[in-house]
Amino acid sequence: MTQRRISTILESSDESYKCTHCRAFESYDLDQVVSHCETCDQMPRPNKYKQRFVCILCDYGGYQRSQIKGHLFTHKGLRPYRCDYCGYASARNSDLLKHVRMKHGAGGAPPDFE
Ligand SMILES: [Zn+2]
Ligand SMILES: [Zn+2]
Ligand SMILES: [Zn+2]
């Protein structure tokens, strides 16, 4: 019985994370990135509690590891909604539906352009 470890899109991404605050840090490893979010001394932390973890890509701050992790996903452009017809993917279901309607005319109805 083998259990497959399902890695997230983020973990399997081949793009590295670079810290825009110190410009010295770069890693592919999300846990290392989160650790850096806590330790980088170039990050703006006006509130040590609210900005315990600061995003390496912007000024977003969070007190909990899970908060900053979730935030980092947004930068990766995590797009769980994928088009069945082409390679398009979107972060929001509504965007995907719009795409399918515009590009593929889902439902058989032509786009209502004149
Ligand atoms: Zn840094
Ligand atoms: Zn950010
Ligand atoms: Zn498509």
Image (cartoon, rainbow, N blue to C red):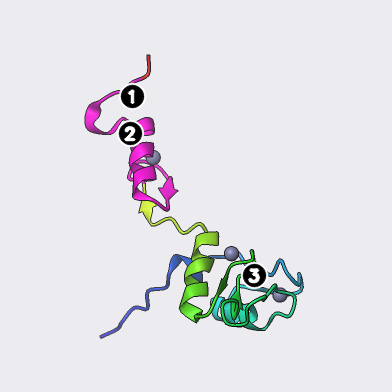
Mark 1 to mark 2 CA distance (whole Å): 7 Å
Query: What amino acid is at disc 2?
Result: Arg
**Mark earlier in primary sequence (1, 2):** 2
From the viewer's perspective, is 45 left or right of 74?
right
Residue 81 horizontal/vertical position (percent)? 36, 52
**Mark earlier in primary sequence (3, 1):** 3
**Would you place residue 2 above or below residue 94 in this image?**
below
Query: What amino acid is at disc 3?
Result: Ile
Mark 2: secondary structure: helix
Mark 3 to mark 1 CA distance (whole Å): 41 Å
| CB contact under 8 Å: marks 1 and 2 | yes
Mark nearest the camera among 3 and 1 is 3
Task: Please identify the residue farthest to the top as the structure is shown.
Answer: 114
Mark 2 to mark 3 CA distance (whole Å): 36 Å
Q: Residues within 10 Å of mark 3 (few under 14, many from 20)?
A: many
The residue under label 3 is 56
Residue 26 appears in the rendering? yes
From the viewer's perspective, is 56 left or right of 82?
right
Q: Point out the stretch of residues depicted in magenta.
A: 83-112
Residue 114 horizontal/vertical position (percent)? 37, 13
Q: Residues within 10 Å of mark 2 (few under 14, many from 20)?
A: some
Q: Is residue 110 magenta?
A: yes
Mark 1 sits near ligand 3, with its Cβ under 8 Å away: no
Answer with the quadrant where ligand 2 appears in the image.
bottom right
The residue under label 2 is 101
* Residue 60 figure quarter: bottom right
Which numbered tag is attached to residue 111? Answer: 1
Residue 8 horizontal/vertical position (percent)? 43, 69
**Would you place residue 114 above or below residue 104 in this image?**
above
Residue ID at (30%, 23%): 110
Query: What amino acid is at disc 1?
Result: Pro
